[in-house]
């Protein structure tokens, strides 16, 4: 059950809309289901004294506004309180009596009409559809004082959760006040009328998020916005310093012909100019251990940047599993930027799902856990590198590294879901799982060709060589991991990767142990696929197996031999190219 609260100054105008046909003739059988005294005139059903609905509507307006007129100048300018309450999709149809009870619960909880108070505000509840009602109240009490409506939205949300439980309705996740503002009904109708797939608010929110992803300065952020076709208007202090910004879509105008401007803070709480400046400042912290990727002339810039970003994303998943809330909250913001960067530069085959994942994860980046001024430079640099490298093709090494990165991002978003769930952040945890679902779909799209090639290569190996690598898998992989990951029947691609790594000069057993030790595998849908991408990244094998494998540098081979395992654990410098070693990593074999 979803409440939506607003305030206005025209009681009669709102009632005309509620009892009218609606903007799309969607209002049917408008009538009262509740009122402050149970005897309010009903323009939808009263046909006795005043058969003309307009006359009854005027009587209802006068009754609601009585205390407002008596209060005179003491009445608030926006004296109309309006709350729509809607059941969730799939809920049963409530009766008028049940909706009346819902309205009474809401007005009591919010302070409009406290239980036992003889001087409550005047209110009505109108029903003109099966799935929702509109509660209208005038904000002057019977004693001519204004009601106390502090945190009325939060109270309405909490009351809706109790109503859902009592009435056996779908239990929605509780909000915490950190979500971005939803588009209004008027914005939605305008989008439909003008043929836009979404409202201007939603389009602008995504444009601002993408513009800030990996931006190095305030000037670059505004330049990206303008290059994306967004109108930008800055608000300046007398000193000339920018205080804030407004954005508008070209052609989006109000009834007076003026552009419809949205302040950044009204798009989302973290998109105000001060919050964006703080993010840009945090990005200037001391850099983390640099990520080195081998220089392959046959790898495009998008492929190299995606391979590098995979290393950084893997490290973020590890950081999210620690008990350092401030650092984890900062990592979530950085992961959100990385997802935005990947979405706007992704191949056509995965673009829709990656954009949906970034849009869903946006909710997971905000909670009441305050992000510390932690080092998010690595994530922001990865996002910047991906944006600057431009769009990736959906084939060859570009497509393979996209699958490699997306496979890791699935694990990152699942780690985010666990982090939020452990802290009671229901909406954020749900958003993280939604993002993971979209990423899984994008992964299957990106990985289809390279994984099919790898499976064919694995099946084509000589029987003796195949048996050798299967023995390595049985010796190194824990039995429970093999069973949980369904690897008993899906080892062809993994065997092919081990064979290619061995031909490139690696110790296959040591390399496999290193891939397993990077972090847990419990959350992986397909352990074999995850290990394939880890192995190919660590060994610097092409992400697309059809591109052929080149022998890595001697230093890389040395780092993955058994004799160097001890030094590898103690020094990041000894790690293979493209990996990040973490002393606090979880070992899945424990």
Image (spheres, helix red, strand yellow):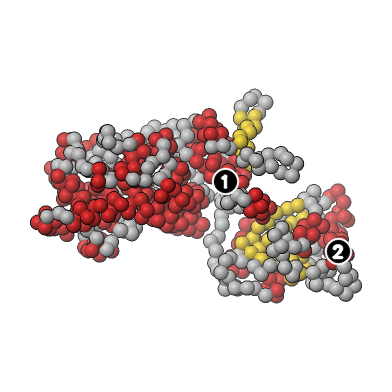
Q: Secondary structure at mark 1?
A: helix
Q: Secondary structure at mark 2?
A: helix
Left or right of 121: which side holds 188?
left
Q: Using a 10 Å C-alpha cutoff, classify the residue at mark 1 as few (fewer than 14 neighbours), some (14 to 19) or many (20 or more).
A: some
* Image position, residue 403 (x, y; %): 34, 49
Q: Farthest residue to the right: give it.
A: 49
**Residue 289 in view:** no
Q: Farthest residue to the left: give it.
A: 464
Residue 177 higher or lower than 122, as above or below: above
Residue drawn 42% across and 34% down?
A: 388
Which quarter of the figure is the N terminus placed in? Answer: bottom right
Left or right of 521: which side holds 111?
right
Q: How many marks?
A: 2
Quadrant of the image occupied by residue 471? bottom left
Q: Earlier in the sequence, mark 2 or mark 1?
A: 2
Left or right of 401: which side holds 190?
right
Q: Are the residues at dot 2 and dot 1 in contact (C-beta closer than 8 Å)?
A: no
**Residue closest to the eye, 398 or 474:** 398
Left or right of 219: which side holds 58?
right
**Residue 541 in view:** yes
Which disc number belongs to residue 211? none
* Image position, residue 74 (x, y; %): 84, 50
* Location of mark 1 (residue): 203
Alpha carbon distance from label 2 to label 1: 39 Å
Which quarter of the figure is the C terminus placed in? Answer: bottom left
Which disc number belongs to residue 54? 2
Residue drawn 51% across and 31% down?
A: 220
Residue drawn 80% across and 48% down?
A: 77
Residue 180 higher or lower than 54, as above or below: above
Residue 132 higher or lower than 333, as above or below: below
Q: Using a 10 Å C-alpha cutoff, classify the residue at mark 2 as few (fewer than 14 neighbours), some (14 to 19) or many (20 or more).
A: some
Residue drawn 29% across and 50% down?
A: 450
């Amino acid at each position: 059950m979803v409440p939506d609260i607003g305030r206005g100054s025209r009681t009669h105008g709102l009632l005309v809309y509620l009892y009218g046909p609606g903007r799309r003739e969607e209002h049917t059988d408008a009538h009262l289901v509740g009122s402050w005294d149970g005897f309010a005139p009903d323009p939808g059903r009263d046909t006795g004294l005043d058969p003309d609905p307009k006359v009854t509507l005027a009587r209802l307006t006068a009754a609601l506004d009585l205390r407002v007129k008596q209060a005179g100048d003491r009445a608030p300018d926006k004296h109309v309180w309006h709350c729509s309450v809607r059941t969730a999709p799939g809920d049963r149809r409530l009766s008028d009596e049940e909706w009346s009870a819902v309205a009474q619960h809401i007005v009591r909880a919010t302070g409009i009409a406290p239980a036992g108070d003889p001087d409550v505000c005047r209110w009505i509840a109108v029903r003109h559809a099966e799935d929702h009602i509109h509660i209208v109240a005038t904000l002057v009490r019977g004693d001519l004082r204004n009601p106390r409506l502090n945190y009325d939205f939060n109270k309405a949300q909490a009351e809706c959760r109790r109503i859902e439980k009592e009435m056996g309705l779908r239990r929605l996740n509780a909000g915490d006040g950190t979500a971005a503002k939803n588009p209004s009904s008027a914005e939605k109708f305008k989008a439909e009328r003008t043929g836009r797939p979404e409202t201007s608010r939603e389009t602008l929110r995504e444009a601002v998020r993408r513009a800030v992803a990996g931006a190095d300065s305030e000037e670059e952020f505004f330049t990206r916005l303008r290059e994306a076709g967004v109108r930008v208007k800055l608000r300046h202090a007398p000193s000339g310093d920018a205080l804030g910004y407004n954005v508008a879509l070209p052609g989006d105008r109000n009834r007076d012909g003026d552009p419809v401007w949205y302040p950044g803070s009204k798009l989302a709480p973290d998109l105000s100019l001060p919050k964006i400046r703080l993010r840009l400042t945090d990005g200037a912290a001391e850099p983390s251990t640099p990520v080195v990727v081998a220089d392959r002339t046959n790898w495009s810039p998008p492929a190299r940047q995606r391979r590098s970003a995979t290393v950084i994303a893997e490290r973020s998943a590890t950081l999210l599993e620690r008990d350092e809330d401030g650092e984890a909250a900062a990592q979530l913001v950085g992961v959100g930027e990385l997802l935005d960067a990947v979405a706007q530069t992704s191949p056509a085959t995965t673009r829709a799902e990656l954009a949906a994942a970034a849009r869903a994860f946006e909710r997971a980046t905000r909670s009441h856990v305050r992000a510390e001024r932690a080092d998010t430079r690595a994530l922001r640099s990865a996002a910047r590198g991906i944006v600057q490298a431009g769009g990736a093709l959906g084939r060859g090494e570009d497509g393979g590294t996209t699958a490699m990165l997306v496979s890791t991002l699935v694990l990152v978003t699942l780690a985010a879901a666990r982090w939020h769930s452990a802290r009671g952040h229901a909406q954020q945890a749900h958003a993280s799982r939604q993002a993971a679902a979209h990423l899984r779909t994008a992964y299957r799209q990106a990985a289809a060709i390279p994984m099919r090639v790898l499976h064919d290569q694995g099946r084509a190996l000589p029987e003796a060589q195949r048996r050798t690598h299967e023995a390595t898998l049985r010796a190194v992989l824990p039995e429970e991991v093999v069973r949980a990951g369904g690897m008993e029947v899906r080892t062809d691609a993994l065997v092919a990767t081990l064979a290619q790594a061995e031909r490139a000069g690696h110790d296959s057993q040591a390399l496999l142990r290193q891939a397993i030790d990077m972090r847990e595998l419990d959350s992986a849908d397909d352990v074999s696929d995850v290990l394939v991408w880890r192995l190919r990244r660590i060994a610097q094998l092409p992400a697309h197996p059809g591109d052929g494998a080149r022998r890595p540098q001697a230093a890389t081979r040395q780092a993955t031999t058994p004799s160097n395992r001890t030094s590898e654990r103690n020094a990041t410098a000894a790690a293979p190219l493209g990996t990040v070693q973490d002393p606090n990593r979880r070992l899945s074999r424990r």
